[in-house]
Image: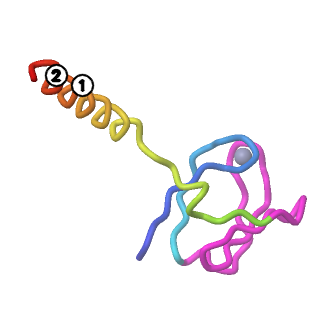
Amino acid sequence: MVIKVIKCPSCGEVLELSDMYEGMEIQCSLCGLSMIVKGDELLVLDTNEVYSIESLAFEEEEEEEFEEEFEEEYYDYDYEE
Ligand SMILES: [Zn+2]
C-alpha cells in the first residue's frame, strides 16, 4: 500500500493518502475541504481546482536542516583554501 503525505491546499493540514483513496471523495480533517484523488492529481470539489499531488507533498523539516549543515561545511572548506 502506497501512502502519500500531502498538505491540504486550503489550510495546510497534513493529510495521509493511501492508494485506496483513488477516485474516492476525501475530506480534510481540519477545514472540511472535499477532494478527490485522481492518479497524480487532486481535484478540489468546492472550487474545481486541480493540484498535482507532487506540488502538495509534505516535506519534513529535518531535510532542510540537513541541507543547511551541508552548506556550512562547504563554506568552511572554501575559507581554508
Ligand atoms: Zn484543510
Q: Residue at x 68, y 48 (%)?
A: 29
Q: Is residue 37 left or right of residue 66?
A: right
Q: Which amino acid, mark 2?
A: Asp
Mark 2 against mark 1, which lies toward the viewer?
2
Find the magenta span and give its range: 20-49
Q: Please give the name of the residue rendered at 66% of the width and 71% of the height, measured from the top-left corner.
A: 41
Point out the image quarter for the N terminus: bottom left
Residue 72: numbered disc: 1
- Hey, which quadrant is residue 44 in on the image? bottom right
| Cβ–Cβ under 8 Å for marks 2 and 1 | yes
Horizontal and vertical percent position of residue 71: 27, 31
The residue pinned by badge 2 equals: 76
| The C terminus sits in image quarter | top left
Q: Residue at x 75, y 64 (%)?
A: 35
Which amino acid does the dot numbered 1 rest on? Glu
Q: Secondary structure at mark 1?
A: helix
Q: Secondary structure at mark 2?
A: helix
Q: Is residue 34 above or below residue 8?
A: below
